[in-house]
Image (spheres, rainbow, N blue to C red):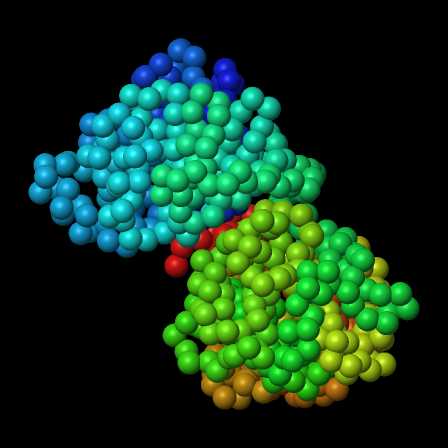
Amino acid sequence: MCGIVGFYSPESDLSSELILSLKKLEYRGYDSSGIAILTGGEIYCKKAVGKVVELENVVKSSKAYSKPAKLGIAHTRWATHGLPTEQNAHPHHSFDGKIWLVHNGIIENYRQLKEELEKEGVQFYSQTDTEIIANLIAVNYSGDLKHAVLEALKRVIGAYAILVFSSDEPDRMVAIKNGSPLILGIGDGELILASDVSALIHKTREVIYLENNELVDVFQGRYEISIDDKLSQIKKTEYIDWQESAANKNGYKHFLIKEIMEQPKVIEDSIRGRILDNNMGVKFGGLDQIKDSLQAVDKVLIIGIGTSYYAAKLGQMYFEELLGIEASCELSSEFRYKNTKIDSKTWVIVLSQSGETADTIAALEEAKSRGAIVTGIVNTVGSSISRLTDAGVYNHIGPEISVASTKAFTSQVVLLLMHAIYLANIKDLKTSDTNKILADIAKLPEQIQSLLNNNEKIESIAKKYYNYRDFMYIGRRFNYPVALEGALKLKEISYIHAEGLSGGELKHGFIALIDKDFPTLALAPKDSGFEKMVSNIEEIKARSGPVVAITTEDGTEIEKVVDDVIYVPKSDSTVLQPIINNIAQQLFAYYCADLKGGDVDKPRNLAKSVTVE
């Protein structure tokens, strides 16, 4: 969601430094941006609606601050309270103009607080909940910013990460978090606070991940971390091993196509060191510490939302297929409201690329409160989910910048399959099938590269379909969750309305939508469900619906009943074929979106990391 950055730095051009960091946060999703710099007790503030480049242009065309500046804050806003206007853009200031802050999160009791402050004579200029925090700090301020922040937040209910400074203390910045991510970067003579490592990785790799209610007091180039005015123990820094080049397009038109093309390496990085010699099993160092508890597991529950939920649905099928164990998946946003029976023999696996997804964190905490074993699959080292789980596994795939998730889904699915094999190993349920699957996983990078090398064919097919307003995606068995994911990708980046369903559902309502203007993408690999998928396709064609089929190289007979075919390499393991099929879908969605001319990496109204509920 919103991105925040704060610098305490000797940089002479602090505005350029802040804007550069904001550009690295653009993928999170936003509608306006702004900066505020404290220079000699005076405030230099500029805001703009739209892309960060609009803010950059405003800064370049304005009379820049002339006094030396060491301290500045910046923000990309994703509107929650109030329209996306310059007035509602951050940074916000207090009624007296002394307190300035940026905020990521939602204040749930802001209306009540606003009414109370207005009765005290405080005037407001924006529609945002953030302005309430600035004014609460101002009414509690008597020369000590840290004390004022702590007193103000005693009245606040909600999630937040804030960076705040006062014009009365020109060498000080205070930051605090509760429920929203915040990271402290330790640079060479400078300190950077940000909601995401991508905003500071170009300056430092040494970071401290802050826990809820931890406050950072930055003063004259030093910092102290405390909770409730009590200094915390000295926290060890962590090293971010992402390559900065991974956050650049490297010649690709969009991050999305770059990340699709990276997927052979994504699989290599996800499985490296985790498959035993001769494919005799799986090793996860992060899970070995709880191996004894996992041996007693009799039920698996996988939790995610969005793309991660569709990965969870496929993971559920893997556990059922390989172990015959009771398995289910839940939307993280719904889990807390259901009386799902879990106990100490339930293994709950939570999925999140960022490790900061608010709904998933809440579900994780609920599962732990009910006594389950809770582990995670996350991509961001040190993220909230990685710290809250009992144990876990990292994707190790580098940053995913495009809002639409592609390579994270592929990694999650592969790792879930390996989690199922891991559990089979420690329960002594290993079969020759698992050995074969592990051998076939190792072949995936080459097969996917072969598909990516022939992407021009998919692009040519997309040219025939990108102007349609609606689309149907159908699949069966392991391809059913992939059909759901394919429909999600198409609608989120191209804005084409898309429905995903199981082939068996077609006659139960969905077929009423089919006509000559409602095409279908059918996942029809040459497997045990092939004939049923062909029957589905014939039903669609009988109603004049155009059909694009994704099938394996041995499924050529499907050409007789469809309008267009995308051929993909065939895996010898049925459980792996959906991964290959999905990458073909990703390419189709990407080319449709690119042909429509939209902002492929930053689709409207969407955010990469949904850090508030």
Residue 102 appears at what percent x and percent y? 37, 37
Q: Is residue 76 visible?
A: no
Q: Most extreme residue toward the right, as rendered? A: 278
The one nearer the camera, 572 or 273, is: 273
Foreground pick, 292 / 317 = 292
- Left or right for 490, reference 181: right
Q: Which sits in the foreground, 239 or 370? A: 370
Q: Is residue 197 above or below residue 274?
A: above
Query: Residue 90 sits in which quadrant?
Result: top left
- The reply, left or right, for residue 102 in relation to residue 492 is left
Q: At 68% across and 64% down in the image, what residue appears?
A: 289
In terms of image quadrants, where is residue 312?
Answer: bottom right
Where residue 95 sits: x, y (%)?
20, 31
Report whether 236 appears left or right of 365: right
Q: Position of residue 497 (x, y in %)?
A: 48, 66
Measuring from the top left, give residue 55's x and y in whole percent: 42, 30
Which residue occupies the foreground of this view, 510 or 307?
Answer: 307
State whether residue 209 appears in this view.
yes
The residue drawn where x is 48% and y is 61% is 361
Residue 571: image quadrant is bottom right
All told, the count of numbered labels is 0
Position of the C terminus by quadrant: bottom left
Q: Residue at x 60, y 39 (%)?
A: 237
Q: In the drawing, does residue 62 fall left or right of residue 138?
A: right
In the image, what residue occupies the spot 38% across and 74% down? 337
